[in-house]
Amino acid sequence: MVVGIETTGHYYEHLVFKCQLEGYHVRTINAATTAKEREALLNWSKTDNLDLMAIVQSIIHDRGASNELPTGEILQLRKLTRARRELISERTKTKNLILMHMDHIFREYQGKTVCVNGKKSFAKPLTNVFGKAARYLMRHYPHPSDILKLGEEGLRDLSIRENLKLRDKSIKLF
């Protein structure tokens, strides 16, 4: 008996492992393959019955893969890699949301167009918008008027006091 299982996320792994322990020959079918089989059946709707037919057709046409699932350290590394990828994705989404909100409140925070010798160029007051100085300013001076109240001298004093390492060029751009 051959068991065909569509690979969806990581949900299929326990089923494959259990079937292999029971001695069944398992063929894993990629979700894209079942989508193509549904297309070949000229039925683009997605129901469990159509998915089952697509899996059966994939096995009949020898499109599934027969491979052992990883165990031990390889399995642990796969899980860690997935977790890391998800965390990086969440961090990116969070940073994008922060930048979106900062754009609404403080558009020049990420940089602004300046005219140098008659030519327009883009100048950034901060090299890293999530560095120490940037995070401090976002936390304590989130609005442009807060920074304007400080003025150049106030920003310079703040930079020295909090060890923000703001350069004169950055201070003038604010």
Image: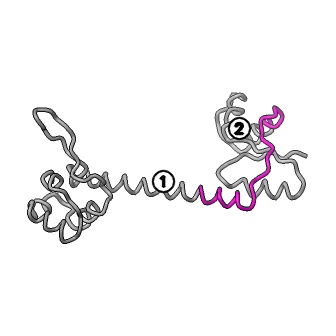
- Please give left or right for residue 139 compared with residue 86 in the image: left
Q: Position of residue 168 (x, y in %)?
A: 14, 55
Identify the residue shown where x is 60% and y is 60%.
Answer: 80
- Please give left or right for residue 48 compared with residue 88 in the image: right
Compare marks 1 and 2 and give the one earlier in the sequence. Answer: 2
Identify the residue shown where x is 53% and y is 56%.
Answer: 86
- Please give left or right for residue 17 compared with residue 141 in the image: right
Residue of label 2: 34
Q: Quadrant of the C terminus?
A: bottom left
Identify the residue shown where x is 78% and y is 41%.
Answer: 65
Identify the residue shown where x is 10% and y is 34%.
Answer: 117
Q: How many marks?
A: 2
Residue of label 1: 89
Dot 2 lies on which element? helix
Magenta highlight on residue 61: yes
Dot 1 lies on which element? helix
- Report the amino acid beneath label 2: Thr
> What is the distance, in whole Å, between disc 1 and disc 2 at their CAs?
27 Å
Q: Nearer the viewer, residue 29 or 158?
A: 158
Q: Quadrant of residue 98?
A: bottom left
Q: Position of residue 31 (x, y in %)?
A: 67, 41
- Report the amino acid beneath label 1: Ser
Q: Residue furthest bottom?
A: 161
Q: Position of residue 87 (x, y in %)?
A: 50, 59
Mark 1 Cα-neighbour bin, 10 Å: few <14, some 14–19, many ≥20: few
